[in-house]
Image: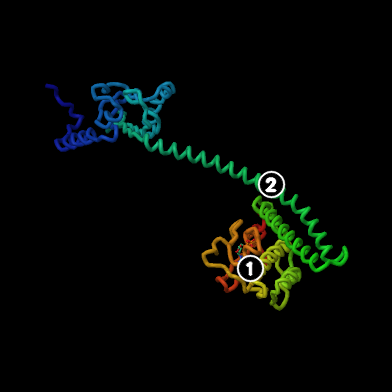
Amino acid sequence: MAVPDKSTPRPTVKAALEAERYRLLVESVRDYAIFLLDSTGHIISWNIGAQNLKGYTKTDILGQHFSIFYPKKDLDAGKPARELVDAIKHGRIEDEDWRVRKDGSRFWANVVITALFDADGKHVGFAKVTRDVTDRKQQADRLLRANHKLEAQRAELERLNTIKDEFVSLASHQLRTPATGVKQFLGLLLQGYAGPLTEQQFDYIQKAYDSNDRQIDMVNSLLHTAQLDAGKVVLRHETSDIDSLVGDVIDETVDTFKRRCQTLTYEKHAGVIEAAVDPLRLRMVLENLIDNASKYTPDGGKIHVTLARQDDFVVITIADSGVGIHADDMPKLYEKFSRIPNALSDSVGGSGLGLYWAAEIIKLHGGTISVESAPQAGSTFEVRLPLHPQKKGAVR
Ligand code: ADP
């Protein structure tokens, strides 16, 4: 009988039992391939999970080199040997890649190889745990493909959108010039430059003038929106007297109000309010809001405009006694092309672009627009602009 080497401590009964229990536990794991390799990569243990996953029985596989599980391209690239070297160097490695079963089929594996050392630090082998994560990989691939497809669709939509913006911009320019010519000549006729008109002639020409005016408004709205969406709007800030700016807009609209027998009143803040705004664009915003107030108020109604300064803000309100807006419609108010039907919307016409454009321009100024309204109780729009806007918010 061989004499036991005194330098090697003999395992206690308890430790031997624990090792056996551990071995049985590993052997019974079904979902993970768990096996040991010797220091050269030959297989020295095999569990039921490994058999299920890779198709080899214990008898088939014990003593074989673990590189048997790698596809040819990995073998040619020396991957198995490299992974063992890396596992020794770093203690463990984790890899996700294709592996091959006994029947030649492939599965996507998550592999962890842990280098094993004895008590003296001598390398004695490897523990290898492999999981089949093909389902997860297929799902991830599907997501990736869907993502690529979406990305391609987004790029295409962006391209089409740019083409659309350019087309709208070009078409609007081309439409605006002749329409403006018509407006000028109809205006001359109405003012009597071509001789006196009968009442009926005047009436017809006035109708043609109004239709043409609406057409120009529509073309302008399209053009301005296309410029805005193309990021081509750069505000030109100028220190402006807001009172005279509001006053000018009101003066220009007097005729419209007269024709609709509407009363427009203006209550201004005492003293000068100067603010750095883009005067041209702010004027257009106010024209839009005052025009809406008139459009959506029946003949004979009232529109009241106020101007005030509150701390570092200039506040302009436009209140009307018109049809009002239902609470449910509020979220759509500033959306592009959003016309909200009401008792007057059919007769007055519009593009649904005015408030969208106005709100964006106010935003570029660093300001806000809000409204208080209820059906049949009129609407009050409030525009609040900083007196000294931050330049960074002004350019788009
Ligand atoms: P448009 O007037 O061309 O339809 P806007 O963008 O200016 O487009 O307005 C969007 C919608 O908001 C309008 O269709 C209208 O229903 C509603 N609206 C705007 N201003 C008022 C107002 N002062 N009173 C009632 N409804 C209004």
Mark 2 neighbour density, 10 Å: few (under 14) some (14–19) many (20 or more)? some
Q: Identify whether 381 is placed above or below 158.
A: below
Q: Is residue 190 above or below residue 83?
A: below
Q: Residue 269 or 265: which is nearer the viewer? A: 265
Residue beneath disc 1: 296
What amino acid does circle 1 point to? Tyr
The residue positioned 55% from the left and 41% from the top of the image is 153
Give percent across and percent down for residue 219.
Answer: 71, 55
Quadrant containing the N terminus in the rendered view: top left
Which residue corresponds to the image point at 65% horizontal and 64% vertical from the top-left?
A: 347
The answer to whether residue 317 is above or below residue 174 is below
| Residue shown at the point (70%, 53%) measured from the top left | 223
Write down the quadrant of residue 151 in the picture: top right
Secondary structure beneath disc 2? helix
As helix, strand or loop, the secondary structure at mark 1 comes to loop
Q: Name the quarter showing ligand 1.
A: bottom right
Badge 2 amino acid: Phe
Judge whether residue 122 can be spotted in this image. no
Q: In this view, does 216 lie to the left or right of 149?
A: right
Q: Is mark 1 within 8 Å of ligand 1?
A: yes
Quadrant of res 199: bottom right
Front label number (2 vs 1): 1
Which residue is nearer to you in this view: 346 or 240? 346
- Counting the numbered discs, the total is 2
Whether residue 232 can be seen here: yes
Ligand 1 closer than 8 Å to the CB at disc 2? no
- What is the CA distance from the residue labelled 2 to the residue labelled 1? 31 Å
Q: In this view, does 206 lie to the left or right of 144?
A: right
Figure coloring: rainbow
Can you give x and y, in whole percent of width and height, for residue 196 in the image?
86, 67
Q: Which residue position holds label 2? A: 167
Q: Which residue lies furthest to the left in this view?
A: 1
